[in-house]
Image (spheres, rainbow, N blue to C red):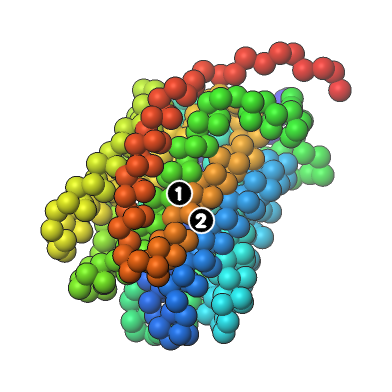
Amino acid sequence: MSSQPKNLSMAQVLICGAAIVTLSMGIRHGFGLWLQPITQDQGWTRQTFALALAIQNLSWGFCGIFAGMLADRLGAFKVLIGGALLYGLGLLGMALSSSPLTFALTTGLLIGAAQAGTTYAVIYGVLGRQIAPEKRSWAMGVAAAAGSFGQFLMVPVEGQLISSLGWKEALLVLSAMVLLIVPLAYGLREPGFQGSQAPKRQQTVAQALVEAFKYPSFQLLMAGYFVCGFQVVFIGVHMPSYLKDHGLSPQVASYALALIGLFNVFGTYIAGSLGQKMAKKNILAFIYFARAVAISIFLLVPLSPLSVYVFSAVMGALWLSTVPPTNATIAQIFGVQHLSMLGGFVFFSHQIGSFMGVWLGGVLYDKTGSYDVVWYLSIALGVFAGLVNLPVREAPIQRAPLPAA
């Protein structure tokens, strides 16, 4: 009888993984709704709030590298449990912070670390290990679509919680809700990670890192993902305030973010499915070019609820649709042994872009009274990202035989 442990069923992995991403990503997508209530109540500038969110994105990206390493070595289950507990504590701290420093430490560092242990890098590592290559890109699209559905589901809920309970009480409710990740994590207890010995690896961590960072296509994927982070986090955090500054009601912003989430369900699923049939680099290039066009048209036409909803639907289809083809490309080039870690490094680049997008949005608004410069930067970066993805080579890397241990 073979001692090789059986894989988890695809249905179990997808249901539990998708539910975790729905909760974790759904909650974080609504943070822009707290910008004005918190800054007005606390007497802080938008830059103060934006800096905490920028730190959150950096913390998420940096901690994601180590969360990925741990998930590759110990399995996703333990990392998810720790991430869920940190998330609950971070949301509690976000509600109770009375100074910009404690707000930055809880909303920034703590929630960022929590997101590292409860989102794509960890979940995609499970998918890569448990699902056959011929269905891997599709499965990643399903998981990303779940995160988008979480935005569609959770953003209106968060808006309703703020309006009915108040912003502090709304955060306390979310801090309890996010602990549902703990029971869901039990469905992702992978065979082979239950004992004291981690699965054997053909490469060490150091060998995998040296190989990846010397490979030009890995660097190009990181550059494109930087732009993805810049664009989506700037829009997700600052668009509600941008719309309110132009006289539109807060409900328009809530519906706009919900539409982004709804259409991203379709966009990410389609991107993941297409990744099984066509070159993923071409999918990525199209997404970035299309974003640049969509933002340009949005700025050119008269601003109205209709133009906001159309823009949100188009951007939604392009929002996180970069995630499945990017991660599937990493798995295709380098294999799945260190997928969570390598995905974590690429995602760190995404989060540096997120830091720049959310922070520059706050800084330039406070200096100029307008978001125009950051919108123009988003257009230029979209063109850049489309161009750098075109030369990516997706074929599996050819390795020389490794020396015996």
Mark 1 = which residue? 229
Mark 1 residue type: Gly
| Image quarter of residue 85 | bottom right
Mark 2 = which residue? 355
Q: Is residue 140 left or right of residue 152?
A: right
Residue that lies at the very extreme toward the right in this rendered image? 405
Q: Residue at x 45, y 85 (%)?
A: 43
Residue 142 shows in this picture: no
Q: Is residue 205 left or right of residue 188?
A: right
How far apart marks 1 and 2 lie (CA) works out to 8 Å
Residue 373 shows in this picture: yes
Of 48 and 373, nearer the camera is 373
Q: Position of residue 102 (x, y in %)?
A: 61, 77
Label 1 residue SS: helix
Q: Position of residue 261 (x, y in %)?
A: 33, 55
Label 2 residue SS: helix
Q: Is residue 228 left or right of residue 5?
A: left
